[in-house]
Image (spheres, helix red, strand yellow):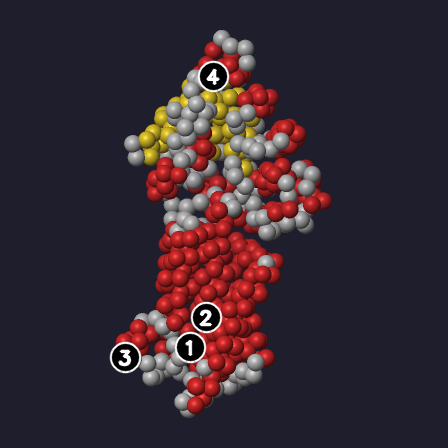
């Protein structure tokens, strides 16, 4: 499951919350410039994996590297190497689009010289430059997502994490958003790591797909490799063949489990 | 410094954009000034204690700062609820800087509200004994504001819901205020109340304000300032410690 020059390297990672194992002995690598999708049913361990990669959670065992930085031991350097679009909005809605970008630039230590130009470039790219002085609370869901992507790219990250970025968006906005991501990935040469429940999006966008279930990595490869491996015709059929048809209850993201996540979180 | 500045600026911008917050912040102190100042003022004067409005203004300014700075903890809860907190927690900056930036912003808006109360008081007839000491009074208000904003950061760091925050807020803020001598002189109160007031850091802020604005003191300015500095350092440390354990 290894690739050349990995930007993301996950090695034998396990995450336990008390007696519950959210992620179990997971290993994979993602190459520079790759568009990589992590799929799985609710509670499979997708968000826990992203939270570990983005320093919000510490693994119980195993190691995670981002752009050559150990996520646990060198968390500041790891944090500088990624941008993230969370599943839920994380913008300051009382501030304007431009102010949100400025704030992010300061938080990530982007050099003042050239920051205005960088903000203009990114806001233009996501077609929000004309709305830069508008308070975010007046934006639609799609506009907020575009702004979050632009913000996530501001500090020249090596990796962009997108945790279910199209959740709740209409088809047009979803298509537009993935066009942006592909365009940005191509222009910035960055690695994109995303989760989604829309399999057609993963099929259309991802270079490689990992499928996680019950905390374990059950498959990894291109759509063609996954369909060949499962003797199916589509990614959806392959996905169902690998994860079954039983409806899952969310376990890790439930309120009670999050309380234990919070208690166990390692702090700076 | 850039991180602290931008997070401080964020609080200032949010404050001036929320006009209702400004009016709300002034409404309650104004009510206290008018209702108590004029309602109890005549009794106070008859008791030979002088001008009650004059006595009351420093306490009401301190009250405004106390209540406003405590509101900063609620801002943390809003940031958690609306997701912005995550943006700051995954950033490669120390939690101390994040806490200080926000708390200094919350403290600044609290001091601005305290100054608005001073302006209203001037319109109602209040006059400081020495205008030259007004900047010292503002510095004292700032110390109080920083201490309370850091304390509210600590509360906002571990309380998960707004109802819980309000309950803790009321449990702590009202005793701090009503047992501080903000509304009455501490010289003639029962011994138990005087002892409680001596253990209440708010008493020293009120006393220092009163000393600089109207020349009346119970503890003495030096003691007031020593206690205030200790409280500020303790609250910054407490806020920083709790903020390290904050949950998004």
Residue A121 appears left or right of B229: right
- Image coordinates of residue A18 in percent, x first then y, are 30, 35
Q: Quadrant of residue A127?
A: top right
Host chain of mark 1? B
- Residue at numbered disc 4: A240
- Residue at numbered disc 3: B191
Q: Are marks 3 and 2 in contact (CB under 8 Å)?
A: no
| Badges 4 and 1, same chain | no
CA gap, disc 2 and disc 1: 10 Å
Host chain of mark 2? B
| Badges 4 and 2, same chain | no
Q: Are marks 4 and 2 in contact (CB under 8 Å)?
A: no
| Badges 3 and 1, same chain | yes
Q: Badge 4: how crowded within 10 Å, few (<14), some, or many (20+)?
A: some
Local SS, label 1: loop
* Residue A183 visible from this viewpoint: no
Give the answer, above or below, for where B136 lies relative to B70.
below
Local SS, label 4: helix
CA gap, disc 4 and disc 2: 62 Å
- Residue at numbered disc 1: B183
């Amino acid at each position: 499951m290894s690739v050349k020059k990995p930007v993301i390297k996950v090695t034998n990672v396990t995450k336990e919350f008390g007696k519950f194992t959210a992620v179990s002995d997971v290993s994979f690598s993602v190459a520079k410039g790759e568009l990589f999708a992590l799929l799985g049913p609710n509670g499979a361990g997708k968000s826990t994996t992203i939270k570990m990669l983005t320093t919000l959670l510490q693994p119980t065992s195993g190691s995670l590297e981002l752009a050559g930085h150990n996520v646990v031991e060198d968390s500041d350097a790891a944090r500088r190497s990624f941008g993230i679009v969370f599943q839920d909005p994380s913008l300051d809605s009382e501030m304007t689009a431009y102010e949100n970008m400025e704030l992010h630039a300061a938080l990530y230590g982007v050099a003042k010289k050239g920051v205005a130009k960088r903000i203009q470039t990114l806001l233009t790219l996501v077609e929000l430059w004309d709305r830069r002085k508008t308070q975010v609370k007046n934006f639609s869901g799609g506009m907020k997502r575009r702004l979050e992507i632009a913000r996530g790219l501001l500090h020249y990250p090596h990796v962009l994490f997108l945790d279910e970025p199209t959740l709740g968006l209409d088809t047009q906005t979803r298509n537009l958003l993935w066009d942006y991501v592909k365009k940005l990935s191509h222009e910035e040469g960055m690695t994109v790591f995303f989760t989604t429940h829309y399999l057609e999006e993963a099929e259309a966008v991802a270079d490689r797909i990992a499928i996680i279930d019950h905390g374990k990595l059950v498959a990894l490869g291109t759509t063609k490799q996954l369909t060949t491996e499962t003797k199916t015709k589509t990614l959806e059929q392959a996905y169902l063949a690998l994860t079954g048809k039983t409806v899952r209850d969310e376990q890790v993201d439930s309120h009670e489990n999050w309380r234990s996540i919070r208690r166990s979180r390692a702090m700076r | 410094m850039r991180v602290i500045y931008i997070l401080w600026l964020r609080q200032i911008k949010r404050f001036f954009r929320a006009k209702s917050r400004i009016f709300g912040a002034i409404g309650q102190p104004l009510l206290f000034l008018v209702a108590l100042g004029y309602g109890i003022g005549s009794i106070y004067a008859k008791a030979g204690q002088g001008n009650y409005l004059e006595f009351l203004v420093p306490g009401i300014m301190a009250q405004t700062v106390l209540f406003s700075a405590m509101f900063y903890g609620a801002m943390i809860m809003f940031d958690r609820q609306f997701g912005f907190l995550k943006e700051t927690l995954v950033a490669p900056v120390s939690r101390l800087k994040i806490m200080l930036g926000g708390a200094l912003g919350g403290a600044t808006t609290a001091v601005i509200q305290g100054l608005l109360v001073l302006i209203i008081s001037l319109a109602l007839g209040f006059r400081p004994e020495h205008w030259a000491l007004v900047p010292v009074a503002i510095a004292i208000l700032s110390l109080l504001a920083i201490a309370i904003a850091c304390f509210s950061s600590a509360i906002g760091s571990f309380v998960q819901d707004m109802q819980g925050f309000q309950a803790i807020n009321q449990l702590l803020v009202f005793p701090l205020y009503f047992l501080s001598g903000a509304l009455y002189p501490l010289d003639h109160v029962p011994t138990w109340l005087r002892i409680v007031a001596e253990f209440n850091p708010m008493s020293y802020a009120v006393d220092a304000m009163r000393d600089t604005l109207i020349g009346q003191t119970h503890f003495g300015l030096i003691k007031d300032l020593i206690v205030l500095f200790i409280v500020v350092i303790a609250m910054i440390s407490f806020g920083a410690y709790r903020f390290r354990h904050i949950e998004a």
